[in-house]
Image (spheres, grey):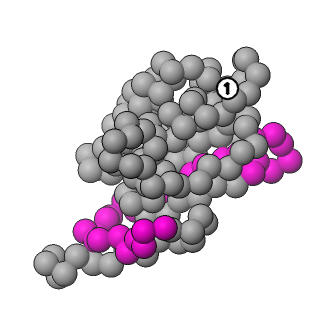
């Protein structure tokens, strides 16, 4: 007597990771891979656009600022749960990034500010038992329009609160 065949999976995986070389082209490649994955998960367009922008910012930071030996990779991972999308970017540099206030004349330096403003939550931590760090953000799948409550100098690691926009109540 034969045993019944294993059940066929009915859903696509909700966890995916890409390992990309530490190169400028990897930023665009990560955006393309994410957009394809978001389409397969049928994510709403506004969530996809926000997450793609924030992923691009974290990948750019990892490429530009993680001064590590040649051959090191940048890892990008996306995990979709019932109500949230979590995106992480891991690199081999131990230096933890800190948000800063860029002057109006500077062409860069606003990446973490964008992450802080557009993500529902974000953070940075050293890799468990390894070299480097993980920078992550989460976006809710059902977003409420809001105005972030941001003081001029947001202490690193403090959670940002989001207040409903008064005109949208």
**In the depicted view, which residue is nearer to us: 112 or 59?**
112
- The residue to which callout 1 is attached is 73
Compared with 166, 72 (above or below) is above
Q: Is residue 129 magenta?
A: yes
Question: Which residue shows up at 80% across the image and 50% down it?
Answer: 128
Residue 143 visible, this orientation: yes
Q: In which quadrant of the rendered view does residue 52 lie?
A: top left
**In the depicted view, which residue is nearer to us: 124 or 2?**
124
Q: Position of residue 102 (x, y in %)?
A: 42, 49
Q: Position of residue 150 (x, y in %)?
A: 40, 71
Compared with 91, 141 (above or below) is below
Question: Which residue shows up at 50% across the image and 68% down it?
Answer: 154
**In the depicted view, which residue is nearer to us: 111 or 38?**
111
Q: What range is drawn magenta here? A: 126-153
Question: Which residue shows up at 69% across the image and 29% down it?
Answer: 67
Q: In the visual, does 1 lie left or right of 80?
A: right
């Amino acid at each position: 007597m034969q045993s019944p065949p294993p059940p066929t999976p009915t859903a696509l995986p909700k966890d995916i990771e890409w390992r990309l070389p530490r190169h400028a082209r990897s930023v665009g490649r990560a955006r393309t891979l994410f957009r394809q994955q978001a389409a397969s998960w049928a994510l709403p367009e506004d969530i996809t656009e926000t997450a793609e922008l924030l992923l691009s910012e974290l990948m750019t930071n990892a490429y530009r600022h993680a001064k590590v030996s040649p051959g090191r990779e940048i890892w990008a991972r996306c995990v979709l749960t019932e109500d949230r999308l979590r995106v992480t970017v891991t690199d081999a540099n131990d230096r933890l990034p800190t948000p800063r206030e860029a002057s109006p004349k500077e062409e860069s330096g606003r990446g973490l500010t964008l992450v802080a403003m557009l993500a529902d939550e974000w953070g940075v931590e050293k890799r468990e038992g390894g070299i480097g760090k993980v920078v992550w953000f989460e976006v809710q799948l059902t977003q409420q329009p809001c105005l972030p409550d941001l003081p001029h100098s947001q202490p690193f690691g403090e959670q940002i609160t989001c207040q409903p926009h008064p005109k949208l109540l």
